[in-house]
Amino acid sequence: MSAKTSVWLAFFCVFGCLIHDADLRSIQQRASQCGYQSCHPTKPNMLNVHLVAHTHDDVGWLKTVDQYYYGSETRIQKAGVQYIIDSVVEALLRDPEKRFIYVESAFFFKWWKEQKPKVQDAVKMLVEQGRLEFIGGAWSMNDEATTHYQSVIDQFSWGLRLLNDTFGECGRPRVGWQIDPFGHSREMASMFAQMGFDGMFFGRLDYQDKDERLMTKNAEMIWHGSANLGEEADLFSGALYNNYQAPDGFCFDILCNDQPIIDGKHSPDNNVKERIDTFLDFAKTQSQYYRTNNIIVTMGGDFTYQAAHVYYKNLDKLIRYANERQANGSNINLLYSTPSCYLKSLHDAGITWPSKSDDFFPYASDPHAYWTGYFTSRPTLKRFERDGNHFLQICKQLSALAPQKPEEFDPHLTFMRETLGIMQHHDAITGTEKEKVALDYAKRMSVAFRACGATTRNVLNQLTVQSKENVKDKSAKYVFEFKTCALLNITSCPVSEVNDRFALTLYNPLAHTVNEYVRIPVPEPNYKIIDNQGITLESQAVPIPQVLIDIKHRNSTAKYEIVFLATNIPPLGYRTYYVEKLDSSEGSTEGSTASRALPKRTSSVTVIGNSHIQLGFDTNGFLSEVTADGLTRLVSQDFLFYEGAVGNNAEFLNRSSGAYIFRPNEDKIHFATDQVEIEVYKGDLVHEVHQKFNNWISQVVRVYNKDSYAEFEWLVGPIPIDDGIGKEVITRFNSDIASDGIFRTDSNGREMIKRKINHRDTWSVKINEAVAGNYYPITTKIDLEDDTARMAILTDRAQGGSSLKDGSLELMVHRRLLKDDAFGVGEALNETEFGDGLIARGKHHLFFGKSTDREGVSLKGIERLTQLEKLLPTWKFFSNMEDYSADEWQTAFTNTFSGISLVLPKPVHLLTLEPWHENQLLVRFEHILENGEDASYSQPAQFNVRNVLSAFEVEGIRETTLDGNAWLDESRRLQFAPDPEEAAVNTYATFSQPAESVHLLSAEKPMLAVKYADEALPAGQLGAESNRIRRETDSQQDKKDEGRSSKATEGPYNSFKADSSNQEYIIELSPMEIRTFIVYLTPA
Ligand SMILES: [Zn+2]
């Protein structure tokens, strides 16, 4: 963000000039000593200024990923990542004193693959000596508000794995580096901790919070990442003083305009004294706000170090001239450092630290800039990313389950992994990129879908067609298409529309048997659905709303959806259904089971639902009451829109609403309508109310006959702007629940966090934007309750949401704005498609009922289980069946399959099952409930892993950290001691004015016994760095492989394998626990 762009010096040394054999030999003789012991020493009696040379390389923002990498489109931004890594490596090779950190694995590995072995060796040497250090290390620096934990874990696992594969132990990052994301989630802290990170630094927090924390020396803290997991989710976290920029005037990059240090003895421009004075003043000032005699100063910014020596040359001078003053009594010591070396210094200071239990949302950068708009920006890209995660999991599972694994499976899966990794970037899923970049992301996603689609088609054909005996076209490469209908989001699917006979294969990615209501778009209402046992299923035809049919770019003949209930779909498996069009004379399923539309503008009250839940609609067509669990309460639902503020952004007061910022114009809000046109369809399987609010907002409210919740499928857009007003559209549910200003929102789809209107837990907030300042990110769920009743809404993508009045929940579904909000993107968030405003469609699931003493499973329990089924429903694969009758299909092919034999306990989710290294699986199990959410489901759950994975020949299994790249039993983290309860404020005097003198705290004696992990280990071991899953080098591997053709990694695991034959692999999970394993398979 906000790069200072200016002079572009075209200096790039011809790379490789430094890598001569002679240089390498002499340097390589130095022992490998990455990690904390590679840190430059600090001086105990001085203020140590840790200068961190770094570059912040967005994986797409104003330019696409490739434009950033190659450095094209310099008119948009002068940024070329390949030059950065080239020139940094060169600078590091010149001088062993220098340090650099690199963060974004997506870019690094693109560069790495282009390098010759000689360069790769040189880089390995730099990494082994701790001169080039990986920080963060995920595929991208993910957003924390709009991302789902499953995708965050995935993209860390992949980035860390490539680092591990390439550099081994020395490539493993120890510190999280979330310097640019727009606010920080508690779940992210929890995940960092569970991945074994020692700490994390970040840049952006509410400006009031930051002031308060600096003034009270609370900017570095122990963050309790989980309300369920205890200390294992604690993470030391530090707010950086100057975001991630260099101090004012000290950006020495070619992108900046700041003065270099001019030290010519007789030069009239000599500025050494002034420059050093200024820098030391900055250091003194910063040090007053932090607790130890160490401070971190970030020397870099967006895409800096494209000509690294320019920056480094000035840093060399800065360090030299500043430290020369020590001879004359200066007590400030500058050094090349890294975030982990800084963290180690904080740790070794042996002092205590404040604690925090809430999160850093919402982020405000000034009184009128609440970064709560991006929670919703680009709603369709946000949904596409969720679909991508869904299909990625299926691609992983089917790749693992495939009987035959052609070699293209790996690259297909990797492409999709990496695409989803890019999507998590804080300018991708957030919707804060330029329109062209958003289109590039979408294109990448669709290519990834095609790649993995080729894999799933292959595997499903292998599983379905076990013998070619009855196959009619024996020359065809594949018997069945197993097509994904990408346009089901507008209820369109060529296979089901064109063919009179087709098969629908439902693949279930959950480790539970599921039942699911399925909808298939078809041109006519009369179809027969036959399951794999030849039984004709009950079905119901429901008309597709006219507003959907009328969408201009919807090129489809489908006018109905056939609905049926698919039952007992096997875990990690599929069931296939044969669908056949009936002659119109064969009787209409529509006629028999569904009542036709009631007249529009019904004058009577309408009720839909079943014995679990009923929804009442008033005579104006609005939802008016809900009955469930024996409670009948007033619940209404409406669409409204805010007007986006328009200004010139010249000062706070003139801030516009934009891609990042939500700023409604004087909180002006408009109802979509006061009269909703409705049509009602009631059948045996589903009741639906089709609502039309106006020409651009409509909705289908439906209750399936066995569900205990209601589905609201909204359709919004094109948002009209011919009145010159940008609009931010919300759905709002009002109820008479006395919630007393309290509501709860999820953190990245996992634990719920309590929110209170106009309140923050850790400081007395002054909110200047009554609506935007109370918005929070909703990745999956928002809820509220009183002593009797509760109401919860599940979302199908990230959205902004709030409860602005008691009993009320609102979610922003779509926004279209006409002004840029001046945070760099330089475009208004005015999404169009096919020449018109973007249309978005999505679902909310409404839960309502007793808040306590409910019979059977608690509502919270049902919400959790449903949340999982909505996140990862069955995937619909369509195949043309014109060549096969239902009988032929049934006898010739395998129409049901399960990849596991033991269904997991209800609260346990098989979060990950993917092929890892050769003959290895990466497997994660997760307990999806929090403590106290349900009397029985919130209990620890136990099961036998071997039984779950009976489809595989398991040789051994070993537990790892959350990311799958380090052994859990070898993982050591730096421990930090919390402040004694009453100490925080007393120990560190608060002040309101920066003092003149350097306020140094003694770092000599620990206040509490702080144990460093090293102490407990035998001499010579690396302690915190020793937690690597060891990979053999090629030469070791070759020796072990003698006499074997397989490249299985076996040697180091012998100790484990010894007891594997007896082991029952029973594991237990507590609420919210995730456990990760490498599973060793018998080589084929
Ligand atoms: Zn960024």
Image (cartoon, rainbow, N blue to C red):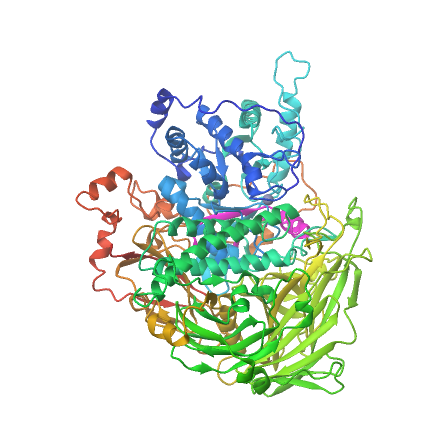
The residue positioned farthest toward the top in the image shown: 266
Which residue sits at x=63%, y=21%?
272
The residue positioned farthest toward the right in the image shown: 723
State the quadrant of the C terminus.
bottom left
The answer to whether residue 587 is magenta is no
Which residue sits at x=78%, y=55%?
645
The answer to whether residue 195 is magenta is yes
State the quadrant of the N terminus.
top right
x, y percentage for residue 792? 60, 73
x, y percentage for residue 426? 58, 49
Q: Is residue 6 above or below residue 890?
A: above
From the viewer's perspective, tell me whether residue 139 is left or right of residue 76: left
x, y percentage for residue 211? 67, 48
Which residue sits at x=25%, y=51%?
1053
From the viewer's perspective, tell me whether residue 664 is left or right of residue 397: right
Determine the quadrant in which ligand 1 lies. top right
Q: Which residues are magenta?
A: 194-223
Residue 927 appearing in the image: yes
Which residue is more in the foreground, 425 or 860?
Answer: 425
x, y percentage for residue 4? 66, 35
Which residue is more in the foreground, 373 or 311?
Answer: 373
Which residue is more in the foreground, 40 or 467?
Answer: 467
Residue 708 appearing in the image: no
Q: Is residue 360 above or below residue 313?
A: below
Which residue sits at x=45%, y=38%?
133
Q: Is residue 210 above or below residue 541?
A: above
Which residue is more in the foreground, 964 or 191?
Answer: 964
